[in-house]
């Protein structure tokens, strides 16, 4: 089955700085890579996704890049704000289901 | 995107009992997914529920412990049976919202005492 590794497990950044989270996947057949943000006590919310035929996608302050050859994808958050503090999960879609990374706890320091 | 109503939102249960969690979707979906999220951990897929067929369970999860029903294309239940404190967790259902991606119910926080 698919194995998704996510790094770092925790990330502390100064407000206004950028945050980068990296994930690798094992199965080259995976074709869809969403990122979720989970605030404490709430459900995971999709924040951005990318499909295997695209190398980069951007939505305001967040962007995702995908390197199919190396089987890794990354989330970039620019100009971080206190409300960006949360746990972020990457995932890879393969054979009808999602496999999730272990998560990254992001703390934005004011 | 699909809207999922999940209940109960939380419960405290005695060990040895069972709890049934319900998820209702506002549109018809082929597959519904049930996840477990242990405190501070990631999401682990328990099983996939298809209407009209047996659920597909992931490694480490069995039907006797987590029976699933899928009576129609908008509804599913997950039962946590013969509970022990190790079953204390958050349980979430999820559906593929197509263009809008996979969405989650609000979760059920289960505490077994």
Image: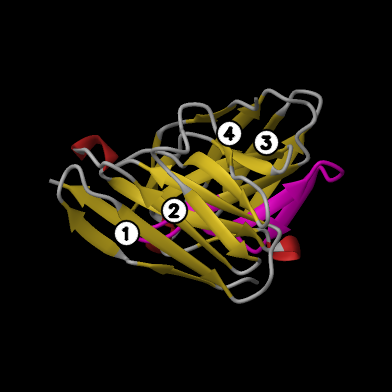
State whether residue A94 appears in this view. yes
The answer to whether marks 1 and 4 sit on the same chain is yes
Residue corresponding to mark 3: A73
Q: Do tag 3 and tag 1 residues touch (Cβ < 8 Å)?
A: no
Reading the image, the residue beneath label 2 is B78
Question: What range is drawn magenta here?
Answer: A36-61
Return the residue nearer the eye: A85 or B108: B108
Q: CA distance from mark 3 to mark 2?
A: 33 Å
Q: Quadrant of residue B74?
A: bottom right
* Element carrying mark 4: strand
Q: Secondary structure at mark 2?
A: strand
In x, y percent, where is residue B9?
Answer: 32, 66
Which residue does the numbered mark 1 point to in the structure image? A41
Say which of marks 1 and 2 sits in front. Answer: 2
Q: Could you tell which of marks 3 and 1 lies nearer the N-terminus?
A: 1
Q: In the rendered structure, does residue B77 fall within the stretch colored magenta?
A: no
Using the rendered view, name the quadrant where residue B107 is placed. Answer: bottom left
Question: In x, y percent, where is residue A36?
Answer: 54, 52
Binning the other alpha carbons within 10 Å of mark 1 as few (below 14), some (14 to 19) or many (20 upward) gives few
Residue displayed at 74% across by 49% down: A50
Check if mark 4's residue and mark 3's residue have beta carbons within 8 Å: yes
């Amino acid at each position: 089955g698919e194995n998704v590794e996510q790094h770092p497990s925790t990330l502390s950044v100064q407000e206004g700085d950028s945050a980068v989270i990296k994930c690798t996947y094992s199965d080259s057949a995976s074709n869809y890579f969403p990122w979720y943000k989970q605030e404490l006590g709430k459900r995971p919310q999709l924040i951005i996704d990318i499909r295997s035929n695209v190398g980069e996608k951007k939505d305001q302050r967040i962007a995702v890049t995908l390197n199919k050859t190396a089987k890794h994808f990354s989330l970039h958050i620019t100009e971080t704000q206190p409300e960006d503090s949360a746990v972020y999960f990457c995932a890879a879609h393969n054979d009808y289901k999602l496999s999730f990374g272990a998560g990254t706890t992001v703390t934005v320091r004011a | 995107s699909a809207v999922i109503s999940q209940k109960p939102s939380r419960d405290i249960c005695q060990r040895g009992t069972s709890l049934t969690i319900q998820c209702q979707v506002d549109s018809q979906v082929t597959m519904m997914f049930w996840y477990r999220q242990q405190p501070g951990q990631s999401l682990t897929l328990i099983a996939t529920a298809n209407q009209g067929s047996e659920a597909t369970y992931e490694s480490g999860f069995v039907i006797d412990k987590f029976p699933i029903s899928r009576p129609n294309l908008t509804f599913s239940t997950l039962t946590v049976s013969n509970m022990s404190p190790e079953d204390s967790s958050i349980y979430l259902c999820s559906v593929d919202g197509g263009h809008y991606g996979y969405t989650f119910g609000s979760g059920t926080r289960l505490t077994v005492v």
